[in-house]
Amino acid sequence: MATETIIWLIPLPPLLAFFLIVLFTNRSKALSHTVAIAAVTLSWLGSMVVFFRALGTEHFGKEVFASSVNWLPTGTDFLKIGVQIDPLGAITLFFVAWTIFMIFLYSVGYHNFGQPKGDHDRPGLPPHGATVTDSHGHQHVVPSVEPMYSRFFAFLALFAFGMYVLVVSDNLLTLFVGWEIMGLCSYLLIGFWYGKPSARNAAVKAFMTTRVGDVFMLLGLALLYSATGTLNYRAIFYNEEVLSRLAETMTPVFGLSAAGLIGLLLFIGTIGKSAQWPLHIWLPDAMEGPTPVSAMIHAATMVSAGVYMVIRIFPLVTADWHGHDLTAAMSVIAFIGTFTAIFAATIALAQNDIKKVLAYSTISQLGFMISALGMGAYIAAAFHLVTHAFFKALLFLGSGSVIHGMEHGVLHTGNHHVDPQDMRNMGGLKDRMPITFWTFLIGGFALAGFPLVTAGFWSKDEILADAFAHEHWVILATLSIAALMTAFYTMRQITLTFLGQPRTREAEHAQETPWTMTVPLVVLSVFAVGFGWVGIPEHFPLLGGLIPNWFHEFVGGTLIKHPKPVEFSFVPLTISLVVALGGLALGWLVYKDVKAGDPDPLEKPLGFLYPFLKNKWYFDEFYAFFVVKPMTWVSEVFTYQWMDRRAIDGILHFFARLGLAIGHFFRYYIDKPIVNEFIGDKLGAYWTFQPAGRALSKVQTGRIQTYLIGAVAVFLVIGVALYLFVF
């Protein structure tokens, strides 16, 4: 089969699975997850075929796999849509296919292990089959488990479809379609446990926050189309004439070029989608959804899509960049990424929920990628995007395994007041959940950048090396401190969760999860270690050259001009070693002796900063007071009570009363005395027209046939009259 045909087909199996589950298999758990897994298996297979064909194509990048069709007529031409896989698309397809496949397989075990059948996937909701009374006093029967279970896999399949559409698209319009499909699915899956008010609120929060960024992104798409007449990647990002024109066209907005302005508008979409400051607030709350959803959002789809889009438009953002001093647009992007990296890392230091630590870690690591793109480190950003997807999927799935193991302990003790996600209630799990422990350790070390072994070390080190090589000292210092914090809170998480002695009876009775949950952990741990080896710098001591720097050569071929690798220096390498090993050692030393009920060892040294970090810099409270409350006042008080009820209703009521007054006047002063009494009675019009009215009323039979015959007769009479008098 032709490669282009396979690319067209890759997104279709998850979409078909969505419709099959919703329409036909929703009453069968086994059929539903079988259909979903079969679908993503087909997409995975197609992705691997395309990826390895791309690897085997000589000079891939100059020549790409592409196919397009006419879609919408524009008057003189057609708006074309199609598919395209270039080196960036191929590597993205690779990690997306693997992570989605593993998450779907894991989901089967996640929803079928360790809890009473049918009730564990609905925390906060009444049991299946129970009769409940809603707020209006109406009684309903809670649906059986199968539709809830099937609904999960249907939405997960639609989520996968959206990401595949985004990756294989050859233009920004269909990329935006996949982008919005994922926005919808994030709302549906974050609020999957809709019986919990916190889950409902988190779903709305995610949907509304990302919509803010999407509005600006849509403006950027409109401006780009008006400036170029197309949204096709090859026609814009690989056309030097178009890029030069956009770079030379200046706008009145802070002296930005057209390329810079459009790039920033599109980038705001990424700020929302990839949860960068200041639109980061939705991602930690997204942990209210099932753990596989968290893994999908943080590794395989949603936030990865935001960074992927910025990497895709990199030629546009850097169109007016000359290689050293950053442009205004690049400076904004670099600032947002760098600040987000350290900002989120500080919050992660004081979180106790095992998933929320990882959530803020994701925000921070995405900041590393955005910062790299802002300073022009294209390859480093793409490399960290791929490695992060693997080890973050591993960590989130590992956290779900830990939570399920703890929930088994909760069931054993019967103490449902113990939070199975709070790391302070864990400890000693490495002996009870050995597979989860070792795979989580690999993922954690990859996140911390454990030297030489893990993928996270090589990708994060490349970002620091780029900052050093181009003398971006503030970025280098800030990201180094953020990396130190990352290693510290990662070891804090590992120590509190797995090491030492159990701090609760529930942790003592935790148990390992089934193979459907542990096999994906093992597979992802292989990538969390091995994928970094394909990007080892050529001049790295001892290891350089042993394994070719395949990633740099391959992905670099996406750009018009292949980016040159930075010169090797021991300075960023030393920084990477110190912050990774120092942070891990410090995290273990601080938390190795924490006992049940002990306060966090950071509380005393940090003082007032600890509650500040624990409460996430009070950003939620800030938005609630300065954004939500004013908008609520505007909608409820100003808009409803003043504008709607007083102004608009007042005007409408005035005209209504005016109409009644006019009607009253005509009825009592025109109609009754003049028409009825004078013309009708005194002049005899009533007795003149009444017989005619009664006679004509017989024509109104209510039968269509009669009306049609009458109409034909009238037409015949008119026709004859015209013929006689005109012709």
Image (cartoon, helix red, strand yellow):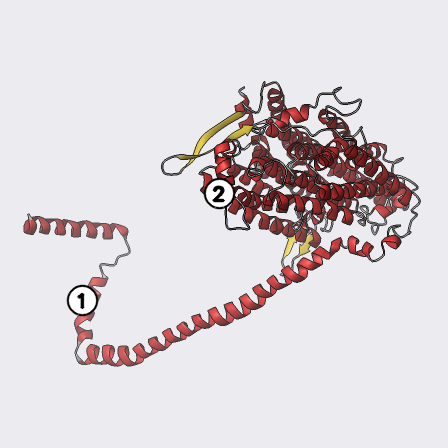
Measuring from the top left, give residue 79's x and y in whole percent: 43, 36
Measuring from the top left, give residue 579's x and y in whole percent: 82, 39
Which callout, 1 or 2, points to the residue nearer the camera? 2
Crowdedness near tag 2: few (<14), some (14–19) or many (≥20) residues, C-alpha within 10 Å: few
Name the quadrant containing residue 557.
Answer: top right
Question: On the rendered image, what quadrant is the N terminus found in?
Answer: top right
Residue 290 in view (yes/no): no
Measuring from the top left, give residue 377's x and y in whole percent: 66, 35
**Element marked by disc 1:** helix
Q: Residue at x 62, y 28 (%)?
A: 556
Instruction: Answer with left or right where residue 307 lies relative to residue 248.
Output: right
Alpha-carbon span between mark 1 and mark 2: 78 Å
Crowdedness near tag 1: few (<14), some (14–19) or many (≥20) residues, C-alpha within 10 Å: few
Front residue of this view, candidates 345 and 563: 563
Amino acid on which disc 1 is placed? Ala
Q: Residue at x 16, y 79 (%)?
A: 683
Amino acid on which disc 2 is placed? Thr
Tell me the tag on residue 594: none
Q: Find out whether the residues at labels 1 and 2 contact each other: C-beta distance under 8 Å.
A: no
Does label 1 or label 2 sit earlier along the sequence? 2
Instruction: Answer with left or right where residue 504 lies relative to residue 367.
Output: right
Q: Is residue 134 above or below residue 584?
A: below
**Element marked by disc 2:** loop
Front residue of this view, candidates 694 and 260: 260
Tell me the tag on residue 692: 1
Tell me the tag on residue 249: 2
Instruction: Answer with left or right where residue 142 lies relative to residue 640.
Output: right
Residue 457 in view (yes/no): yes
